Amino acid sequence: MGDAKTVAVIGAGPVGLAAAAHVLERGMTPIVLEAGADIGHAVRQWRHVQLFSPWEYNVDGAAQRLLAATGWNSPAPDQYPTGSELLEFYLEPLANRTELKPYIHTSSRVTDISRVGFDKLKSKGREAAPFEIRYQNGQGPKTVRADAVIDASGTWHAPNPAGANGLSAIGERENQSRIAYGMPDVWGADRQRYAGKRVAVLGAGHSAIGTLTELARLKAHSPGTEVIWLLRGDNPAKAFGGGANDKLAARGELGSAFGALVAAGEIRVEKDFRVTHLSADKDGLRIGGGSACCGRNVIADELIVATGFRSDLSFVRELRIQLDAAIECPVALAPLIDPNEHSCGTVRPHGARELAQDEPGFYFAGMKSYGRAPTFLMLTGYEQVRSIAAQIAGDHDAANRVQLVLPETGVCSRAPAAGASEGSCCGGTAPAGVDACCGDDAAAKQNGNPAVAAASIDRCWE
């Protein structure tokens, strides 16, 4: 794909626009197809939310260079933007005031991708055929061709359901009027819906604890508001995060503040609760479920489901795609982000090599590349698309020269190694002067066990 000249980018969010900026900087032509009526459509759904990463982690290098040519004043790197500020001070200027503008097509929802003249079954000569991208823009189906495709369409519009088994809970579809997904603006635009109500929030990630924190704030101003946390696990403390050990201070502070609210009894905790049924009666929304041993019910007026997201893979069904069976992400990326395995909260550097598919020239990037895995940071996506653009342009050295330093969460999902302090992760810090990423890595190398060393490196970078 070294001679690729046209690159279709699906999605005009932060990572999609960064991909277009890198493609343009490489002398290629981007075609950006955004399903929403405006760029950053998904960001507009959580514009009330303050990011827990400061500006320095939210601005892409190539995008910044494009903006600099317009006289753009970059925000203070240590300030924490809201979604609204991310749009106003970065994404909208990038899309509307730079060279990217003529390449961006909004209200253009991609429905199918294939190879010109090739269905999924046909192999000979396939890699030389251009991609055919079909999309809808309100005027009937349209088609565009490209030499490569970067799918940065995200996952925001494909939330996970309430059911603990990955399926919609029985009655979930019938009770949609009482259910919201993601992070509704409970303090602002959606305040009337939740004030004075019994509100249950299902989930244990940052979206859930952020929403629960805002509901506790609403409770202090609106008598009668009851906040209920439905937790599938049995240890609420896992959701409190790394606190002072988190290198993103705002993320650590959010977890600490939330822990204090739970300890003070401001939030009712229903732990070990796995939703199976939803039904409405005269008492309200009856949320049925409970633990493996026994069922129970929680009655609420509103339910907010914040259980993560999954990818919409419907429009790539004619492409040769390989995904991890559990996470639904590129196979080579799975060991680095698997929440069942990774320990220290950061991710080892990765780029085009890990994101490549059996369909040459096609890449997932951004949140969609993570499939169902959590804890994605925009900076990860920016480095992904820098590497991918270099690979498409034929600069393989730059594509493989992936450098990414992410702030650690301060959270270790594994028990500390024997003799390590309670706060240690992967055996703690490597001894001074030892070329190792952590204590476990150093010990493995000292004992001459390369397999264990490699595994410990993965855990450290995760």
Image (cartoon, rainbow, N blue to C red):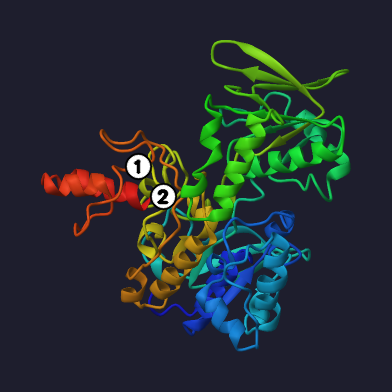
* Residue 231 % position (x, y): 60, 28
Q: Nearer the viewer, residue 275 or 330?
A: 275
Residue 222 sits in quarter:
top right
Asked if residue 134 is positioned above or below residue 222 in the image, the reply reads below
Q: What is the quadrant of the N terminus in the image?
A: bottom left
CA–CA distance in space, label 1 to label 2: 36 Å
* Residue 114 % position (x, y): 52, 60
Residue at x 65% of width, y 88% of height: 71
Residue at x 10% of width, y 46% of height: 448
Mark 2 secondary-structure assignment: loop
* Residue 381 % position (x, y): 50, 62
Q: Nearer the viewer, residue 434 or 176?
A: 434
In this orientation, does residue 241 appear?
Answer: yes
Amino acid type of the residue tagged 1 in the rendering: Ser
Left or right: 429, with 292 as reference point:
left
Left or right: 365, with 85 as reference point:
left
Q: Farthest residue in the left direction? A: 448
Residue at x 15% of width, y 49% of height: 445
Q: Nearer the viewer, residue 383 or 423?
A: 423
What residue is disc 1 on? Answer: 424
Asked if residue 343 is positioned above or below residue 4 in the image, the reply reads above
* Residue 135 % position (x, y): 66, 63
Of badges 1 and 2, nearer the viewer stands: 1
Residue 322 image label: 2
Are there few (<14), some (14-19), or many (20+) residues within 10 Å of tag 2? some
Residue 200 sits in quarter:
top right
Amino acid type of the residue tagged 2 in the rendering: Gln
Q: Are marks 1 and 2 in contact (CB under 8 Å)?
A: no
Are there few (<14), some (14-19), or many (20+) residues within 10 Å of tag 1? many
Mark sitting earlier along the chain (1/2): 2
Residue at x 77% of width, y 42% of height: 217
